[in-house]
Image: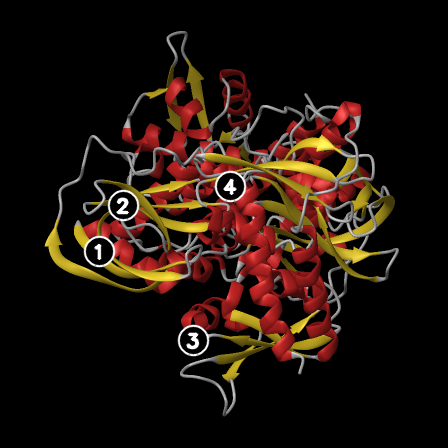
Amino acid sequence: MAKDTEKLIRQLSLISYLMAERRPVTAPEIRRDVEGYSVMNEDAFARRFYADRSELDSLGIVLTVEKPIDGLVEQENYSLPPENFHLPPIAFSDAELAALNTALQLLDGEFAYAEPLRLALQQISWGRPSPLNAPEQSTIALGITGSAGGPDVSTRLAKIETAIFRRKTIVFEYHTMERDAVGHRKVDPYQLLYQGGQFYVVGRSHERSAIRVFRLSRIQGKVGYATKAEHDFQRPADFDPRAYADRIDWQFGEPIGTAEVWIGERIAWQIERHFGRYGEMRAAGDEAENDDRLFVTPFANARQLIAWVLGLGENARIVGPPALVAELRERTALLVDRHSGHPAVAAALPEGGNGSGPRADHARAHRGTDDPDAVGSRPDAAIRPERFARLVTLASILIDAGRQGRILHTADLCAALNISDLELGEDVGVLNVVNFGAGTYVLYAEIGLDGTIEVDPEPYGDSFSRPARLLPVEAKALIAAIDLIGEHIPEGSLASVRRKVVAALGDDPIHEGLQFAAPGGDDAEIAEVVSSAIARRRMLAFEYYKENEDEFSTRTVEPHALINGREGWYVASFDPSRDSVRHFRLDRIKSATVTDDSFEVRHDIDPAADVDGWPRTGEVPAASRARVWISPERARWAREERNVVAELADGAVVVELGFAGVEWLVRETLKEAGDAVVLEPAEARDAVRTAAETIGSGAALASR
């Protein structure tokens, strides 16, 4: 029998024994009565028992130890209070269970933590209809699902997840984008962060003696442990995991100054609502017109801040400090210059014309896949749950069925736990030898040749007949799933589910090393209104800011679903005035109202049908294609995110972008702050130059 299996039998038998005895017991009694210990000598027992206690403690199953007055270890008494093993009952409403059902359906098979999520939902929905058997919902769809993004990243994620749990220092080779160099890193991993469709590890870099953030897709090769020690570090008590999830691009790194950005009244509401937490909104001064505002924000990266301001077009300009104003002016002048006359670019490298070769391979590796055609692929879950958790869950299912006299089927159990027939057989075999001591077993299950399972539970099987408390990775998976989806399920509230789960756990799992950051392009208040309209099948009226055209429109639509994508959350709707499906981004809806007019579900239309397209890839269905030059300084970022069609001799690249309107292409080009140049079509080049000249005039006024 494998050592890991022997350990699981010992640990489960120890729990069963302590729960059945319902009294403090001594170490000699445990050695005598618990399966696996009796064959050991005293020294071996002392080592194994200490190791088993330590591992159970790390899983949140803490034994109570009563020490004698004289200090003799042999006379220590051990017990396991029921509350240290069982999960407190959680009273979910039908609507909350419906929301959990939908969450699992959306994430199953794609979410990196989908497997521990399945086990967590089995435990917290105890005594209620299983979320695994709920009917499928169609009012929400996900383009971004929290997947690792390929086998290499999945492997790294699993290794780092274990390292965080075990407090193990890791080593790896890392490609630093700012310096475009690969170097060795030794890191104490404190936290995993999922943000913008990517996983990051936050930890103390030994090379810098400071906390740094590393993107998993930029790690080269395998992640290893620095030592063979059981633990290498302790996370500082003052480490705040939330601090790294609530930063904007221009605030990554040490602050170098505070910027003042004039915001025109046209978009002041949007900036305050969605970016206000990154700084402070103030009155723009006596000379300001109407409701113009001043956005004051600390920044660590001048280019990123300038890129954001340029993307806002004429509605924003930097007014201080002078050095930042000057850099904005230089970058707008560069945009004008590079879009004037005929574009001059270096010669293309022979291997770069078709997106193949070493640089293209390097870019694909950064995107998390070695398959150049794997756009929109759905990788399996990266994180496997502890087998301990699977055995406890399986035991509870078997005991419950045995007491009710129900016959189980292997196919159903394999589907519910997402395991193979072989794994199920091995797990049943382990549970059949878990006992309370003195020949009293927890259960006996027999798998028939016809795929049925008959269970004979022991009368003392109460230990596993109630839901067990969630292990750390299960708790993290559950909260991460809730945070990823947020308040976007019309069938029920995940916010209330989150509060109840955290209360039952006693602590928020984000403190255990995993956090899913709130996505961009979202608005919680608008989402609540939209969800209400979807659930009630009422028409939705709203005022919408069309960013590309810089204008407002009023719409009344049939809201059918909420979907997310790389850019944020959208309401997928049918617009009767245009007789077609339309998607509206939530953060661009200034105000929304649920009307009294009802609508019927259009069964011939699936508003979320294209969730595998532009929401995942970021490329909308386009009528035109543009070729855009990216400077050598920004080419490595473009290789990660864009479709590179040519590698140039000077290190620059040419990417191809699909676009439906020139205004969108202009904004995307402005957001690159002079490091992107439209090569063709010519009318788009002219439009970028005109927009840059207009912005440059405003920047010149600000510098006077």
Numbered mark located on residue 618 in the image? 4
Which residue sits furthest left? 597
Residue pointed to by mark 3: 265
- Give, as a three-letter code, the residue at label 4: Gly
User: Which residue appears at 61% of the width and 78% of the height?
Assistant: 701
Q: How far apart are the two marked residues, 1 and 3, measured between alpha carbons?
A: 25 Å
In the picture, which quadrant includes the C terminus? bottom right
- Give, as a three-letter code, the residue at label 1: Leu
Q: Is residue 12 above or below residue 538?
A: above
Asked whether disc 2 touches disc 3, contact meaning CB atoms under 8 Å apart, the reply is no
Location of residue 59 in the rendering, given as x and y in whole percent from the top left corner:
60, 48
Residue pointed to by mark 2: 573
Residue pointed to by mark 1: 540
Location of residue 427 in the rendering, given as x and y in whole percent from the top left corner:
53, 25
Q: How many marks?
A: 4
Going by the image, does 554 lie left or right of 109? left
Nearer to us in this view, 262 or 30: 262
Which picture quadrant has residue 71? bottom right
Going by the image, does 557 lie left or right of 37? left
Which residue sits furthest front? 341
Tell me which numbered mark, 1 or 3, is placed earlier along the sequence: 3
